[in-house]
Image (cartoon, helix red, strand yellow):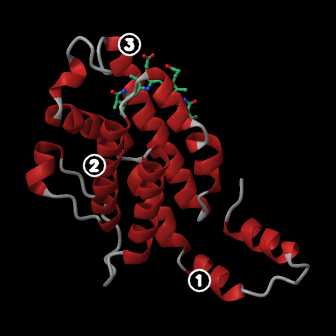
Amino acid sequence: MLDAFSRAVVSADASTKCVTDLGALKEFVAQGNRRLDAVNAIASNASCMVSDAIAGMICENQGLIQAGGNCYPNRRMAACLRDGEIVLRYVSYALLAGDASVLDDRCLNGLKETYAALGVPATSTARAVQIMKAQAAAHIKDQPSEALAGARLRKMGSPETADRCASIVAEASSYFDRVISALS
Ligand SMILES: CCC1=C(C)/C(=C/C2=NC(=C\c3[nH]c(/C=C4\NC(=O)[C@H](C)[C@H]4CC)c(C)c3CCC(=O)O)/C(CCC(=O)O)=C2C)NC1=O
């Protein structure tokens, strides 16, 4: 498992050079508080995000909770909710580290094969992950939509930035995309 710093060391070592690209690390440090706010925005909304994403996935495909569907019976529903939570947790670790290796090594490695063996539909999982990607962007920007959140609307009160943390949103989105491509 690597983070932005250990990644710089490993890359430099691979070419037997001193660490040279300090610009990227300087930026990483300068943006550190945004990153922590972004991780907090995901972590403290995680259970709501997971339950909403799985519910949305099922609303769009109700066969999942009927006999023969992969969220039926309750044991599978519980496994599915747990998997949603696992994915979101590893995305939040990757965002904290500024590196995808923890997500790749400890969550995605072999997941596609496990799902194929168990008959877990990858397209439905991808849909749930896509919903979590949209939720994460809204929470990091601290602009959750009233229309979608209803009575559960929750704002983090993060400091306003002109760009709404666009680069962190893009980075978080890339980790969700990584999950989707690992399953497809
Ligand atoms: C730390 C990393 C890690 C991951 C990622 C992980 C995933 C994982 N999900 C599993 C099962 C499962 N995963 C699902 C998930 C779903 N079914 C659906 O229809 C939906 C599309 C989807 C939820 C979005 C289900 C239903 C099972 C149980 C399948 C079965 O036993 O028939 C299993 C098989 C063992 C078990 O049931 O616990 C593993 C290993 N385990 C890990 O340790």
Q: Secondary structure at mark 3?
A: helix
Counting from the top left corner in percent of width and height, residue 93 is at 56, 52
Three-letter code for the amino acid on which mark 3 is drawn: Arg
In the image, taking residue 156 as reference, residue 3 lies left or right, namely right
Residue at x-position 59% and y-position 58%: 100
Q: Are marks 1 and 2 in contact (CB under 8 Å)?
A: no
Q: Secondary structure at mark 2?
A: helix
Judging by the rendered image, the residue that carries numbered circle 3 is 75
Residue at x-position 91% and y-position 79%: 16
Three-letter code for the amino acid on which mark 2 is drawn: Ile
**Ligand 1 under 8 Å from disc 3 Cβ:** yes
Q: Is tag 1's residue or tag 3's residue first in the polypeptide sequence?
A: 1
Judging by the rendered image, the residue that carries numbered circle 1 is 27
Judging by the rendered image, the residue that carries numbered circle 2 is 131
Distance from disc 3 to disc 2, alpha carbons, whole Å, reads: 23 Å
Q: Are marks 1 and 3 in contact (CB under 8 Å)?
A: no
Counting from the top left corner in percent of width and height, residue 65 is at 22, 19
Give 93 or 114, whichever is nearer the viewer.
114
In the image, taking residue 179 as reference, residue 161 lies left or right, namely left
Distance from disc 1 to disc 2, alpha carbons, whole Å, reads: 29 Å
Residue at x-position 87% and y-position 73%: 13
Q: In front of the other: label 1 or label 2?
A: 2
Does residue 180 lie above or below 158 as drawn? above
Distance from disc 1 to disc 3, alpha carbons, whole Å, reads: 45 Å
